[in-house]
Image (cartoon, rainbow, N blue to C red):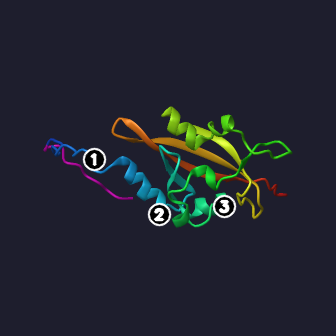
């Protein structure tokens, strides 16, 4: 057991701090740099729906290829999204507009949803379901893109 004595003879006066300096870097570019080196599966798209940065784990999960080759390409060029029916039909344009990366960009709000990706690798097999959480990325007072994190949804059941 330790013994601690506190002096009450000297009043505690917090030290004044210098005011915080406003951020001088572009917020969008900061997220681009972060996503490019992240260990988590994530990507950043710009206003033209082009991939600006993607982590290696994101590219592996979604079957997009090498991160260096997907940067600058349209998000939907390498991503084959299918519906949740047994027919696995490709999503039409009205459904694609509702996927989290695009919805966060167009609405300026957080978006979350499940995606069934025909080329996703989940549990070592093709066709996977991923949970996508997207947020708009602001540059000044306008939305410059969106940042999306992905998590594989496991379909395997373990016997315990």
Q: Give the number of the disc on residue 88.
A: none
In the displayed structure, does residue 72 sit left or right of residue 3? right
**Residue 135: percent from left, percent from top:** 50, 41
Disc 2 and disc 3 in contact, CB within 8 angstroms? no
Residue extending furthest toward the left:
10
Looking at this view, is 118 or 150 the one in front? 118
User: Where residue 63 is drawn, which disc sits there?
Assistant: 3
Q: CA distance from mark 1 to mark 2?
A: 21 Å
Q: Quadrant of the N terminus?
A: bottom left
Point out which mark residue 37 bears.
2
Q: Residue at x 35, y 35 (%)?
A: 141
- Using residue 108 as the reference point, say whether residue 100 is left or right of it: right
The residue at 51%/59% (across/down) is: 71
Gap between marks 3 and 1 measured at Cα: 35 Å
The residue segment tinted magenta is: 1-10
**Residue 121 in the image, given as x and y percentages of width and height:** 71, 60
Q: Residue at x 55, y 61 (%)?
A: 70
Q: Earlier in the sequence, mark 2 or mark 3?
A: 2
| x 59%, y 41%: residue | 100
Q: Is residue 156 left or right of residue 70?
A: right
Q: Is residue 131 magenta?
A: no
x and y percentages locating residue 116 in the rendered image: 72, 48
Which residue carries the number 1 mark? 23
């Amino acid at each position: 057991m330790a013994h601690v004595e506190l002096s009450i003879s000297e009043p505690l006066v917090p030290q004044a701090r210098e005011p915080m300096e406003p951020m001088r870097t572009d917020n969008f570019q900061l997220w681009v740099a972060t996503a490019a080196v992240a260990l988590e599966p994530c990507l950043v798209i710009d206003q033209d729906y082009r991939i600006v940065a993607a982590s290696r784990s994101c590219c592996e999960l979604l079957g997009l290829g090498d991160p260096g080759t997907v940067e600058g390409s349209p998000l939907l060029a390498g991503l084959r999204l299918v519906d949740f029916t047994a027919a696995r039909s490709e999503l039409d344009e009205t459904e694609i507009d509702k996927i989290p990366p695009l919805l966060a960009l167009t609405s300026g709000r957080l978006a979350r949803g499940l995606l069934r990706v025909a080329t996703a690798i989940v549990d070592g097999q093709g066709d996977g379901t991923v949970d996508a959480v997207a947020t708009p990325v602001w540059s000044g007072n306008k939305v410059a893109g969106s940042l999306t994190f992905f998590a594989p949804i496991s379909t395997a059941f373990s016997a315990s």
